[in-house]
Image (tube, rainbow, N blue to C red):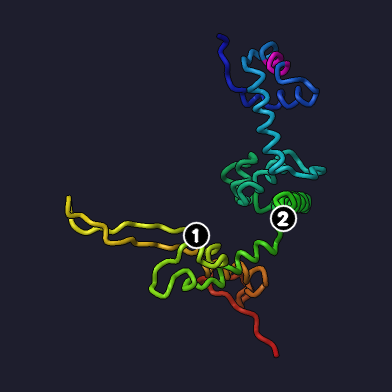
Amino acid sequence: MTAKCSIPRELHGEVRRLAEQGLSGAKIAECLATEHGCKTSARAVQRFLKARADRSEKVAVPDTEGLTGRQVRFIEEYLVCLNATVAARKAGYSARTAGSQGADLLKNPKVKAALSKAIENRSIRVAVKADDVLGELLRIARVDIAQAFNEGGQLKPLHEIPEDVRRAIAGIEVEQLFVGRGEDRKQTGDLVKVKFWDKVRGLELLGKHLQLFNDKDKSGGDGADSGGVVVLPAETD
């Protein structure tokens, strides 16, 4: 039986090039064996190409004109993690400069335009609108936890909890309570812990969307070291 091996990373580009020429998985496997001494199977090649296609569909950059290969990779990685430093590091920038490089890339007009388009395309694919996100944040900000319990203080069955309240719940843990030991050990009830998503965080994100917070302190700084104090705009008549 011929030994099989995975496709080495250095041959990934060669596999894609051969596939673009219209070669079948079997033919590509044959070329890899003949020209590079890589023993693999047609099925392994097909799995590799399918995985690449699936990943490309999820994070594809619709317009790469004017972008370097590393910038395209940065956009792809940023769409996955939404962290500029991590994306820059995975795109090939050094760990030492990834923070500054990521920040600069997000300010680059071409990168910014391509990233915005990619995010827009992904939103269309998954049918998520900005209103959907804001609606979920509003549920978290407005949730009344009393609606999750009956008058006796017991947690209602899930199907009796209002939908808006259910969607604000992050998790439910049930712990059985016992008294006694050995054969005398008996269950006395359940301790139910209900965790809701962070209301303050939800309000903070809504406030940022509505531009309620002034990020500048009175001295003209950016307020980053002001102890978390935010200044609300003055109300007008």
Evaluate if marks 2 and 1 touch, with contact meaning CB atoms under 8 Å apart.
no
Q: Is residue 19 above or below residue 222?
A: above
Q: Position of residue 152 (x, y in %)?
A: 38, 74
Instruction: Residue lying at the far top in this picture: please name it.
Output: 1
Q: Which mark is residue 27?
A: none
Placement of the N terminus among the 4 image quadrants? top right
Q: Residue at x 77, y 51 (%)?
A: 117
Q: Residue at x 68, y 37 (%)?
A: 54
Q: Residue at x 56, y 13 (%)?
A: 3
Prevailing secondary structure class for the magenta stretch in the rendered image: helix
Is 3 in front, or is 226?
3
Whether residue 74 can be seen here: yes
Is 117 in front, or is 3?
3
Placement of the C terminus among the 4 image quadrants? bottom right
Q: Is residue 76 above or below residue 133?
A: above
Q: Residue at x 42, y 75 (%)?
A: 151
Q: Which residues are magenta?
A: 27-32
Q: Amino acid at mark 2?
A: Lys
Q: Secondary structure at mark 1?
A: strand
Instruction: Residue lying at the far right in this picture: please name it.
Output: 65
Q: Earlier in the sequence, mark 2 or mark 1?
A: 2
- Residue picked out by circle 2: 107
Q: Is residue 70 above or below residue 140?
A: above
Q: Position of residue 166 (x, y in %)?
A: 53, 63
Q: Amino acid at mark 1?
A: Ala
- Residue picked out by circle 1: 170
Mark 2 to mark 1 CA distance (whole Å): 34 Å
Q: Secondary structure at mark 2?
A: helix
Whether residue 111 can be seen here: no
Circle 2 Cα neighbour tier, 10 Å, few/some/many (<14 / 14–19 / ≥20): few
Q: Position of residue 232 (x, y in %)?
A: 61, 79
